[in-house]
Image (cartoon, rainbow, N blue to C red):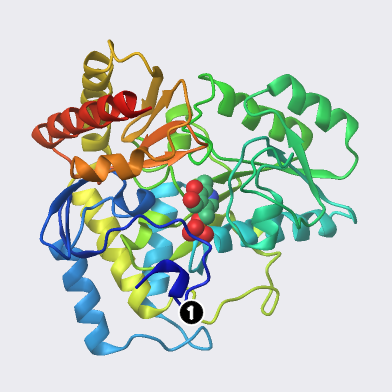
Amino acid sequence: MDASASCLIQNYARLPVTFTRGEGVWLWDDEGRRYLDAAAGIAVCNLGHAHPAVTEALCRQARLVTHTSNLYRIEAQEKLAVELARISGLEAAFFCNSGAEANEAAIKIARLAARANGNEQPLIAVAQGAFHGRTLGAWSATDPLGEHPYTPPPRAPGFIPIPFGDIGALEKAADETPGLCAVMLEPIQGENGVRIPAEGTLRAVRELCDKRGLLLILDEVQTGLCRTGAWYCFEHERITPDLLTTAKALGNGVPIGACLTRRETAKHLAPGAHGSTFGGNPLACATALAVVDTMEKEKLHEQAARTGEYLLDGLRRALAAVSSVADIRGRGLLIGIELDRPCKFLAQTALEHELLINVTVEQVIRLAPPLILDQAQADLLIERLAATIQTFEKDS
Ligand code: PLP
């Protein structure tokens, strides 16, 4: 159907392709063409498409019971909370359906904790260029200076912008901002073009938060669940946040998100203070349990680290002579290739080369393939991406 005739609200600029089947790192369109998926549904299908263990858990649970609501105990939810506590080092989980909702929960917990300490005007420091989701609270923490055309108002108050990775600016804000109660950050800014802070930054933020009595909220919606070569990106700096949000890959495509924290902080969410009808239902939690179990069995964080290094190295060699490439950076299998010019249409050009990529902030190609990608597939990805950029250069 022609987009203008569609009954959908036109809030997405969708590419003209429809996928009907997936397996591993591959997706097939409705004409039978096979594409190498280097986007994984925006860092969601970390185990690849139609992973047998995930499909089996999903079908098994669907045959038993899909939904009961949080009026009752949910065994799979309790088990999943234990698993996430084990892999994150935190203690208590609230389940919801998306990354934005997980961030809403974290923001609310931080504000409630501040109020309990007599802080009636709690403020949260957030990074310039941040992306935390599209619900009102998460949106207000997103791109707090409103620099990008795709993040228009309205915004709720309560967030103050700090340059990403600037410890001095954060320290100054902590000195000068009465009511500051928390710092909220992505360890790597994904939507902002895979921006990686200097080594030691997260550790310095952790130390500052400890000194000033601020809660550290880490949004690992995109970086979590093995994507950067560790269960969570904060492990690279041997710290633990006070609040952690995780979603995307948790259900490998089945909607689920979680906010994790310590018991001491979790006590601020009394019954009725927060909730979700669907959040943590049996179907989503049984699937997520299979996801975590499979990631662990397949040592997926190690594979992501290994293949990530291989891919980064290969890209640097293959694209060294490509004049429009300005920078190549990444950690694990979250990789950004910055061009010297806007390249929004590159994702469409890549379709001609049977490759799925995504472009963020106008001129950064983001690669976030399934973490099961092997070296031969990584070689193919490099080959198809180089061909895509060359086609783009010729045409631009
Ligand atoms: N936080 C980060 C870091 C993200 O990258 C995203 C989505 O891209 C979100 C939050 C929002 O997640 P969702 O789209 O599941 O609400």
Residue 298 shows in the view: yes
Between 210 and 299, the one nearer to me in the picture = 299
Q: Position of residue 39 (x, y in %)?
A: 31, 46
Between 338 and 292, the one nearer to me in the picture = 338
Q: Position of residue 239 (x, y in %)?
A: 52, 33
Image check: 66 left or right of 112? left
Image check: 144 left or right of 103? right
Name the residue tied to disc 1: 278
Residue drawn at the location 25% of the way across and 22% of the way down = 315
Q: Residue 186 lies in what quarter of the image?
A: top right
Q: Position of residue 248 (x, y in %)?
A: 41, 56
Residue drawn at the location 18% of the way across and 41% of the way down = 373
Residue 357 shows in the view: no
Q: Secondary structure at mark 1?
A: loop
Instruction: Please rate how many residues cluster around mark 1, counting C-alpha atoms within 10 Å: few if below 14, some from 14 to 19, many from 20.
Output: some
Between 190 and 1, the one nearer to me in the picture = 1
Q: Residue 179 lies in what quarter of the image?
A: top right
Image check: 253 left or right of 386? right
Q: Position of residue 312 (x, y in %)?
A: 28, 23
Q: Is residue 301 above or below residue 383?
A: below
| Quadrant assignment for the C terminus | top left
Between 239 and 389, the one nearer to me in the picture = 389
Q: Please, what is the three-letter code of the amino acid marked with disc 1?
A: Phe
Residue drawn at the location 24% of the way across and 51% of the way down = 295
Residue drawn at the location 64% of the way across and 29% of the way down = 164
| Quadrant assignment for the N terminus | bottom left
